[in-house]
Amino acid sequence: MNRLRQLRTERTRLTQAQLADLVGVTRQTINAIEGGDYAPSVYLALDLARVLSCTVEDLFPATQEAPHGIHA
Amino acid sequence: MASMLDRAIAAITDFNNPFYAEERQRDVANEAAAFGFWVLYWTLLIGAGATCWFFPEHHLAAGGLAVWVFLVAGLTSLYARRLGVTISARDRNAGYLRRLSHGAVGVWLGVGFADARTGSSGNPWVFLVFFLLVFTLGLASLMAMAGQLRQRPHR
């Protein structure tokens, strides 16, 4: 599960609608991302991270090991 | 400079509409369109087959409809191929039910058309049972697809 809802409420106290306006999507999209029903594009993830002053990795922690041969 | 095909695709799909700028709206709208395509695909093919079997005097119109459906399906594959995606690769991962449905509808339609073309008369009860079998398979495929769309937890 991602941490968008947690970081949105703790860091900025933005509503879903306000965050949606800032990154140029609909409130439903923010809701879907927070609920784990939609994986955003890299561009939207970067926009979300910029607005919430965090990294993409903070928002979407890796839940699986990296593919074979790729090391962090 | 966009080719005539590109201009035609842009006119038909209207992908330049600002609606599609929102990525999730675009994804969902395209999935809904795909679902609608498959509903049309199955209902038109089954309808064409039923027409051949039960209203053989209209078999030419039914055959034309089936050819049109296959042409549109081919155009869909070509569109994807232009963008580097081979849709037929999906069929290798499809379940037996889906593949069986395609084959059954094809045979049912083909035999029905040939039968109507030659004017021979078959046993309508056999055709009815065959129709119900094909219809059930098609409906089951649609329901399975709808279930996959509903249950997919994460994209």
Image: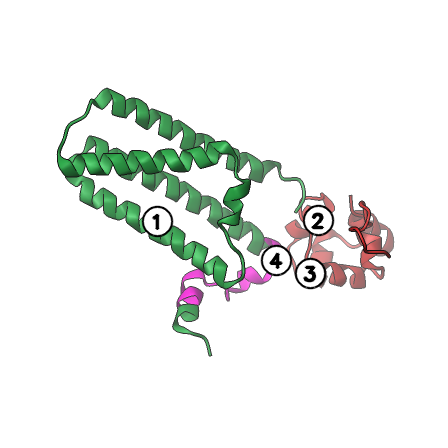
- Label 1 or label 3, whichever lies nearer to me, is 1
Decide: is B20 above or below B30.
Answer: below
| Residue placed most toward the observer, A24 or B13 | B13
The answer to if A29 sits in the magenta stretch is no
Q: Position of residue B20 (x, y in %)?
A: 55, 60
- Which residue is found at the position 55% from the left and 41% from the top? B93
- Residue linked to disc 4: B23
N-terminal label among 4 and 1: 4
Disc number for residue B114:
none
| Callout 1 and callout 3 share a chain | no
- Residue linked to disc 3: A21
Q: Which residues are magenta?
A: B8-24
| Callout 2 and callout 1 share a chain | no
Decide: is B109 above or below B85.
Answer: above
- Label 2 or label 1, whichever lies nearer to me, is 1
* Secondary structure under the numbered disc 3 in the rendered image: helix
